[in-house]
Each structure stands twice: as C-alpha cells, then as structure tokens.
C-alpha cells in the first residue's frame, strides 16, 4: 500500500491492526481505541446507520474509526463488541460454539445496532453469509463495500492464527470469490482499498455519504 505525504495520521495504512471505537454510551473494556473522539472541527450527524462490509483486513474498522474521529460521530466494530460482550476472543468463541454459534451472536448484535441511533458499523467479513443478515443490512441503513484482492488481504494479515477462517492465499481467493456476489447484493456503494491509505479511503467514503445525504452537517 502506498503512503502519501502528510501527517502520521494521514499516512495510517490499512494493514495496521485496530479495533473500532464503540457507541458513546458503551464502556470500552477490550476496545483499544477511545470511546469516541470529539475533535475541534465541525460536527456531523448520520441520517441512517452506515454498515461497512468486505473481506477481512479490507479496512472496515480503520475507515470507520477515521470517519468517526474526523466527523464526530460514533462507530462500533461488531467483532470487538461480541468479544467484549462474551469476554472471549473470536477464536475462543469459534472453538467453543463453532461458526454457527458465532454467526448467531453476530446476527443478534447486528440487529441490535441496526435499531439504535445511526452510527458507523464495521461488520465482520462473513456477515453477509446469512440471508437474515443481508436483509437487515439492506433494510436498515446504507452499506459500503470495501473491496480488497486476495493478494492484498494476504499481505496485510500479520498473524493468520488470529483469523479462524483464513489459512492461506488460495483459501483467501476462494473465500472472496464465493462472497463477492453477496457483498455486491447488499452494497449501496463500493470503494476499492488497494494501494490506498486509511485517510484516502475515508475521504472517498465521506464524499459518497455526503452526496447521498447520509452524512450531514449537524444542525445547531
């Protein structure tokens, strides 16, 4: 991924491991980032929830965090939220209840946040596998699909042991190919993340959300 000439924040790359901020009313026990940063700049508001979908390490969490910081809105990472709620890592959940059990938890929290005040929601890579989840996404808000190639995803993953469904490059190719129609089914907008910084992707997403009337200047 190429870097741009700017501040360190502007040059944050999509391969940097992060967990998203959570909604303002939530505590943040296992979430690395602050609950929500409110910068000294014009505040914005969302007219509908924004769901980020895409393959793992596409930059969903990093992009939603960047937008949350620059626009003064709330964001949540669903995987991190499930980990905090259960007090276990995703790997532990998979080991104890299997993928089906994890997907049930994922659907529960997705439905929960789809019914709250609008915020930025970073979804797990496999959220689109269940038809119930796809229906929630399509009817509840605006869906942004962040695109990444298998090669780029494989290059970004630093520790495959933390990714229960990621084993090697060939697996990544097959998984992305299988999920592509599902991502496209739910997407209201698509953004290519290859060779872009977090700041570049976030700016592109912001322009889309503003154009669609999803992200607006907060009324005083």
Image (spheres, grey):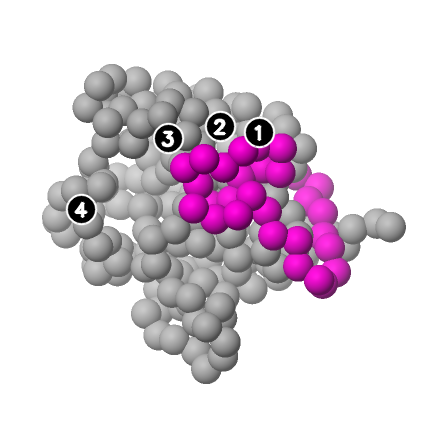
Q: Residue 138 carries which label?
A: none
Instruction: Give the main secondary structure of the magenta stretch.
Output: loop
Residue for badge 2:
110
The mark that comes first in sequence, 4 or 3, is 3
Q: Is residue 43 magenta?
A: yes
Q: Please identify, in this view, whether the residue under mark 4 or under mark 3 is nearer the observer.
A: 3
Residue 84 visible within the image: yes
Q: Which mark is residue 114?
A: 1
Q: Is residue 24 above or below residue 195?
A: above
Between the C-alphas of marks 3 and 1, the distance is 19 Å
**Quarter of the figure with residue 154:** bottom left
**Quarter of the figure with residue 181:** top left
> Local crowd at mark 1 within 10 Å, few (<14), some, or many (≥20)?
many
Between the C-alphas of marks 2 and 1, the distance is 6 Å
Label 1 element class: helix
Answer yes or no: do the residues labelled 2 and 3 have beta carbons within 8 Å? no
Q: Considering depth in this image, is 103 or 93 the residue closer to the camera?
A: 93
Q: Please identify, in this view, whether the residue under mark 1 or under mark 4 is nearer the observer.
A: 4
Between the C-alphas of marks 4 and 3, the distance is 18 Å
Q: Please identify, in this view, whether the residue under mark 3 or under mark 1 is nearer the observer.
A: 3
Between the C-alphas of marks 1 and 4, the distance is 30 Å
Residue segment shown in magenta: 20-49
Q: Residue 83 carries which label?
A: 3
Residue 145 visible within the image: no
Q: Residue 160 carries which label?
A: 4
> Local crowd at mark 4 within 10 Å, few (<14), some, or many (≥20)?
few
Between the C-alphas of marks 2 and 3, the distance is 14 Å
């Amino acid at each position: 991924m190429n870097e741009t000439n700017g501040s360190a924040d502007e040059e944050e790359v999509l391969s940097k491991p992060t967990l998203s901020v959570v909604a303002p009313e939530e505590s943040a026990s296992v979430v690395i980032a602050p609950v929500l940063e409110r910068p000294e700049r014009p505040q914005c508001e969302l007219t509908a929830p924004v769901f980020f979908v895409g393959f793992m390490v596409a930059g969903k969490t990093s992009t939603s965090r960047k937008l949350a910081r620059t626009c003064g809105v709330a964001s949540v990472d669903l995987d991190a939220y499930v980990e905090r709620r259960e007090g276990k890592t995703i790997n532990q959940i998979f080991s104890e209840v299997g993928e089906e059990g994890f997907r049930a938890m994922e659907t529960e929290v997705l439905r929960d946040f789809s019914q709250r005040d609008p915020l930025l929601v970073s979804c797990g890579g496999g959220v689109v596998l269940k038809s119930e989840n796809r229906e929630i996404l399509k009817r509840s808000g605006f869906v942004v699909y962040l695109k990444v190639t298998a090669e780029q995803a494989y290059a970004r993953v630093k520790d495959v042991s933390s990714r229960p469904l990621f084993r090697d490059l060939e697996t990544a190719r097959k998984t992305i190919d299988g999920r592509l129609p599902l991502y496209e089914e739910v997407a209201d907008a698509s953004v290519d993340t290859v060779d872009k910084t977090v700041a570049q992707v976030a700016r592109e997403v912001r322009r889309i959300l503003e154009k669609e009337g999803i992200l607006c200047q907060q009324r005083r």
